[in-house]
Image (tube, rainbow, N blue to C red):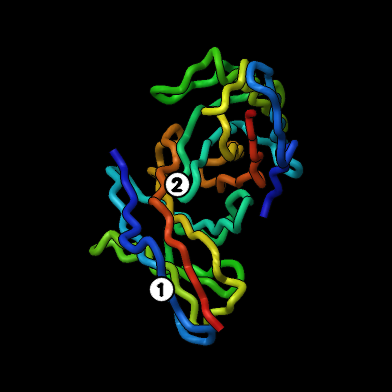
């Protein structure tokens, strides 16, 4: 079985400050990790993914995430938050080498960036 | 990234009627398509997975006779909510993935269904 935990329901940060949205995962095989963002009444937009290689992955809109195998974490980060980054963020995982495996999502973290 | 479209974006219908939602992958071939349901302030709940030309695989607790899924081509999947009731009101999101082992799963913009 695979699972994703996003321990924070909401993260508040001031505009211009760095932000971190936490994610830890559990998967029996090799983790294939994703971050998605959802704006109100919209579907999910792909931000970035980790397959193999460099542990620091860069994605859209200046976001990056760091894969940490020992801590089974894949935290989302951005050096300087924008008010427009306010949205709902989902971390997801699936087993890389089991294509039949579905994506498992975390519960989501609402990011609020205040001016 | 790749684009997945969904139509309609919003639909209001009367109880007892059927509603069809279309999901299209616009610039890639989607071997596998997924349908999710999202309740307010909650994460996505997978309803079913469909592979092109095959019957959909439904998650436990999802009525296959109520939520009819057709994946007729590599770019189109449809979800039909039959005999809709107010409790079916929700946000439905489709998703599509290509054939490669490392293909990303892309999501449509969602359909807000309101059953009166």
Residue B52 drawn above or below residue A110: above
Question: Which residue is depicted at the point 67% across and 28% down?
Answer: B77
- Name the residue at the front extreme: B116
Question: Which residue is depicted at the point 74% across and 37% down?
Answer: B7
- Name the residue at the top extreme: B65
| Residue B116 on image: x %, y % | 64, 28
- Depth check: give the residue in front, B67 or B113: B113
Give the spatial CA distance, label 2 vs label 1. Answer: 19 Å
| Residue B37 on image: x %, y % | 52, 36
* Image quadrant where one finds the C terminus of chain A: bottom right
Residue picked out by circle 2: B43
Residue A15 drawn above or below residue A32: below
SS class of the residue under badge 2?
loop
| Residue B26 on image: x %, y % | 76, 42
- Name the residue at the bottom extreme: A16
Discs 2, 1 touching: Cβ within 8 Å: no
* Image quadrant where one finds the N terminus of chain A: top left
Q: Report whether residue A55 is seen.
A: no
Subunit of label 2: B
SS class of the residue under badge 1?
strand
- Please tell me how crowded label 2 is: few (under 14), some (14-19), or many (20+) other residues with Cα within 10 Å: some
- Depth check: give the residue in front, B112 or A54: B112
Residue A115 drawn above or below residue B14: below
- Depth check: give the residue in front, A35 or A39: A39
| Residue B44 on image: x %, y % | 47, 43
Q: In this view, does A8 lie to the left or right of B62?
A: left
Residue picked out by circle 1: A20
């Amino acid at each position: 079985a695979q699972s994703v935990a996003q321990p924070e329901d909401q993260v508040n940060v001031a505009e211009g400050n760095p932000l971190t949205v936490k994610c830890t995962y559990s998967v029996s095989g090799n983790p294939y990790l994703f971050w998605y963002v959802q704006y109100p009444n919209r579907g999910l937009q792909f931000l970035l993914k980790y397959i193999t290689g460099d542990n620091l992955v860069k994605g859209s809109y200046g976001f990056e995430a760091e894969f940490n195998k020992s801590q089974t974490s894949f935290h989302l980060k951005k050096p300087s938050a924008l008010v427009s980054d306010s949205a709902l963020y989902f971390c997801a995982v699936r087993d890389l080498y089991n294509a039949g495996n579905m994506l498992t999502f975390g519960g989501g973290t609402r990011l609020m960036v205040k001016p | 990234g790749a684009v997945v479209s969904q139509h309609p974006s919003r639909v209001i219908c009367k109880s007892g009627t059927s509603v069809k939602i279309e999901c299209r992958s616009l610039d890639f071939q989607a071997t596998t398509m997924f349908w999710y349901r999202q309740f307010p302030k909650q994460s996505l709940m997978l309803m079913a997975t469909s592979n092109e030309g095959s019957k959909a695989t439904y998650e436990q607790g999802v009525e296959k006779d109520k939520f009819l899924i057709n994946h007729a081509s590599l770019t189109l999947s449809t979800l039909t909510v039959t005999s809709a009731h107010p409790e079916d009101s929700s946000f439905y999101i489709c998703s599509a993935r290509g054939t490669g082992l490392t293909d990303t799963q892309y999501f449509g913009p969602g359909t807000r269904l309101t059953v009166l």
